[in-house]
Image (cartoon, grey):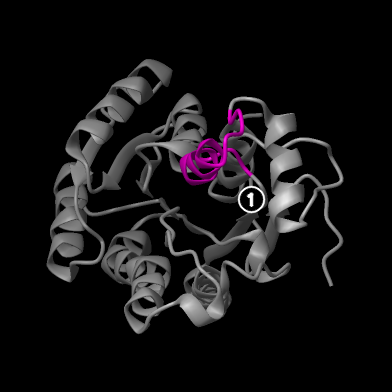
Amino acid sequence: MDLGLTDATAVVVGGGRGMGLATARCLAEDGAKIALIGRTKDVLDRAAAELAECGSPDAIGIPADIAQPEQVERAFAEVARRWGGALNILVNTVGPDVRGDFESLSDDQWRAAVESGVLGMVRCVRAALPLLRSASWARIVNFSAQSTQRQSVILPAYTAAKAMLTSVSKNLSLTLARDEILVNVVSPGSIASEALTGWAESVGVDAHDPYRLMDAITEHFGHPAHLPRAGLPSEIGPVAAFLASRRNSYMTGANVNVDGGSDFT
């Protein structure tokens, strides 16, 4: 499908690996110019080189820690300098890596979850808004999580942060409607991201086998999907890319589950 992204400009926060890179790859294949924001320069450089081969020859990586407001401002100033002050797409994929049951979590861990899971996104949207408003069309896609709708006893802080991100995104969809900036959320389920595969390897599971990975998720978390396997980052990218594209012209304020099927209540 032609997503209408030829010469569109896109920033993918956390786009150096995993679901962020998978999304950036889909945008690049449709002709978008891509800037990746993340903390590690080597990771960003490798990802930008990959995107150049996919159809975004001028893809760049901009190192920045989104926990540092001044670094966020500098990153988006660089985006404005390169692209003339207009931005079509902002995708935020960064989330907290905080695990532990309620009684084991410290105050610092709760703060860290909110910092990386919510405030980083808030800073990026705030810095990007003048650029998004300057474009002829604009989209924001934020990554939440399945666990906001299906709880896990070892993810209360992670889930709380993602639920807060979902709420802020819903508010943004209302706030920015007058500007016709569409804001949507993607909620991945059990996707073989670095975090999940790292956990699987720590408990002795072959993380490269999505069927064994789902067996382990079922055993440890009691959260099987309807499909008998875990998902892949490449199965998230096309959904996020559609929401970020001109093809999505009337969908805003939505939370889209990509989870292999589950009984949410």
Q: Is residue 251 above or below residue 53?
A: below
User: How many labels, in total?
Assistant: 1
Residue 55 on image: x %, y %:
41, 21
Q: Is residue 68 above or below residue 47?
A: below
Residue 169 on image: x %, y %:
53, 72
- Residue beneath the point at 18% across and 54% down: 75
Q: Which residues are magenta?
A: 191-207
Residue 161 magenta: no
Residue 110 on image: x %, y %:
40, 78
Secondary structure at numbered mark 1: loop
Residue 201 magenta: yes
Asked whether 153 or 96 is in front, the reply is 153
- Residue beneath the point at 28% across and 67% down: 130
- Residue beneath the point at 38% across and 42% down: 15
Residue 61 on image: x %, y %:
23, 38
Is 155 left or right of 254, judged from the image as shown? left
- The quadrant of the rendering that contains the N terminus is top right
Is 143 left or right of 242, judged from the image as shown? left
- The quadrant of the rendering that contains the C terminus is bottom right
Asked whether 109 or 252 is in front, the reply is 109
- Residue that carries the numbered disc 1 in the rendered image: 248
Residue 18 in view:
yes
Q: Residues within 10 Å of mark 1 (few under 14, many from 20)?
A: some
